[in-house]
């Protein structure tokens, strides 16, 4: 198993300590990963010195403080709490290519790309990260106003960033609009017939509209920014300009350009189709996972290859249960 250094240290910010063999745990859903630390000496860098260096990774304050810094290919995580359980030092990989749902991380791996910050209900915060090496997205819980013992990032879901339309189309307004313009001389019969045809084909149009919003929404949300975007309550308005529906109207109704332009204008003026459709942002669990990802994730979390395979067989595939 991957060795996790875990030790009790004194009150000094920088010291050399002798590590006694102790047991530590890394938690994942439905399983507990244990690793034995070994003896040795290690110099712990001072928190203030780390803060102003290029190696700074994380700082967190609560009932004490926790910080982390880069050393070679690892993050050294240092906890200095009031309780003995909160006085420890451990090393974790600076980069991760795979993680299992349910794992607790003390730092965010440096190779991950932060895509979305989510302000959830109450004080809950989340982050969505992309792992370029495996192509998966990870939804993380972000510790906020919690004690040091719970100051970890939680892997909530692993899969693919999912952007979907979070609303509907005002078909009742279309009904009313058709009746109100039917006898207006300036509105051609072709336009009225096109609107009536759209109402008859509303389910097909709405299905294509939802697909188009989802397809374009991800690019509008995260495709043109170098840093993470912030959203509230899992929804966002990612559009810089109005969301255009001209091509959808033309595809569904097969009408001439002049009629199409009038239909689109009416849909816009009457707010039948949203100008700026809200989207819901989440990570679709288990979607887009490459072959071998879960075994690699468990091994990187500290489980042996044999244990990882056994876990996947019993928990994910249920083959052992079927065999019995």
Image (cartoon, rainbow, N blue to C red):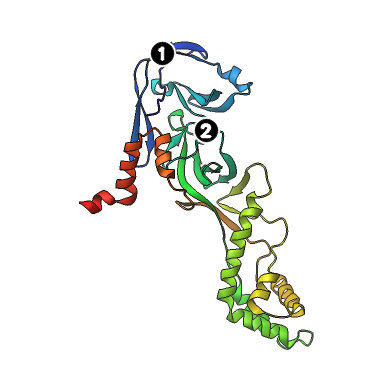
State the image coordinates of residue 224 (x, y, percent, origin top left).
68, 49
Question: In the rendered view, would you say 273 is above or below 56?
Answer: below
State the image coordinates of residue 32 (x, y, percent, origin top left).
33, 35
Question: In the rendered view, would you say 66 is above or below 96?
Answer: above
Horizontal placement of 195 versus 296: left or right?
A: right
Work out whether residue 77 or residue 319 is closer to the camera in this orientation and state it: 319
Q: Residue at x 40, y 19 (%)?
A: 7
Name the residue that disc number 1 marks. Answer: 40
Distance between the Cα atoms at labels 1 and 2?
Answer: 24 Å
State the image coordinates of residue 286 (x, y, percent, origin top left).
44, 51
- Under circle 2, the secondary element is loop
Question: In the rendered view, would you say 320 is above or below 173?
Answer: above
Residue extending farthest left: 324
Horizontal placement of 222 versus 128: left or right?
A: right
Q: Residue at x 63, y 21 (%)?
A: 53
Q: Residue at x 63, y 82 (%)?
A: 197
Please tell me how crowded label 1 is: few (under 14), some (14-19), or many (20+) other residues with Cα within 10 Å.
few
Res 40 → quadrant: top left
- Under circle 1, the secondary element is loop
């Amino acid at each position: 198993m991957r060795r996790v250094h875990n030790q009790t240290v004194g009150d000094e910010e920088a010291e050399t300590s002798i590590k006694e063999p102790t047991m530590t745990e890394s938690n994942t859903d439905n399983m507990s990963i244990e690793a034995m630390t070994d003896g040795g000496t290690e110099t712990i860098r001072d928190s203030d010195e780390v803060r102003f260096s290029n190696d700074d990774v994380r700082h967190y304050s609560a009932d004490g403080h926790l910080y982390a810094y880069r050393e070679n290919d690892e993050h050294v995580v240092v906890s200095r709490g009031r309780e003995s359980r909160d006085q420890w030092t451990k090393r974790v990989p600076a980069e991760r290519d795979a993680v299992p749902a349910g794992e607790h991380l003390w730092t965010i791996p440096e190779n991950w790309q932060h895509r979305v910050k989510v302000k959830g209900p109450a004080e809950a915060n989340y982050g969505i990260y992309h792992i370029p090496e495996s192509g998966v997205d990870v939804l993380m819980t972000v510790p906020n106003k919690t004690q040091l013992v719970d100051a970890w990032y939680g892997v909530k879901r692993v899969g693919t960033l999912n952007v979907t339309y979070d609303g509907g189309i005002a078909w009742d307004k279309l009904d009313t609009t058709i009746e109100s313009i039917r006898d207006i001389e300036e509105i051609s019969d072709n336009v009225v017939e096109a609107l009536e045809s759209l109402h008859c084909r509303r389910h097909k149009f709405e299905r294509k509209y939802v697909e188009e919003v989802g397809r374009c929404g991800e690019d509008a949300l995260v495709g043109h920014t170098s840093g993470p975007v912030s959203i509230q309550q899992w929804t966002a308005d990612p559009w810089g300009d109005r969301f255009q529906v001209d091509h959808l109207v033309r595809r569904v109704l097969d009408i001439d350009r002049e009629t199409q332009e009038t239909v689109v204008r009416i849909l816009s003026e009457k707010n039948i189709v949203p100008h700026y459709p809200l989207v819901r942002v989440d990570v679709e669990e288990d979607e887009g996972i490459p072959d071998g990802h879960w075994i690699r994730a468990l091994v990187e979390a500290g489980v042996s290859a044999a244990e990882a395979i056994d876990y996947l067989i019993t928990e994910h595939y249920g083959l052992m249960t079927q065999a019995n």
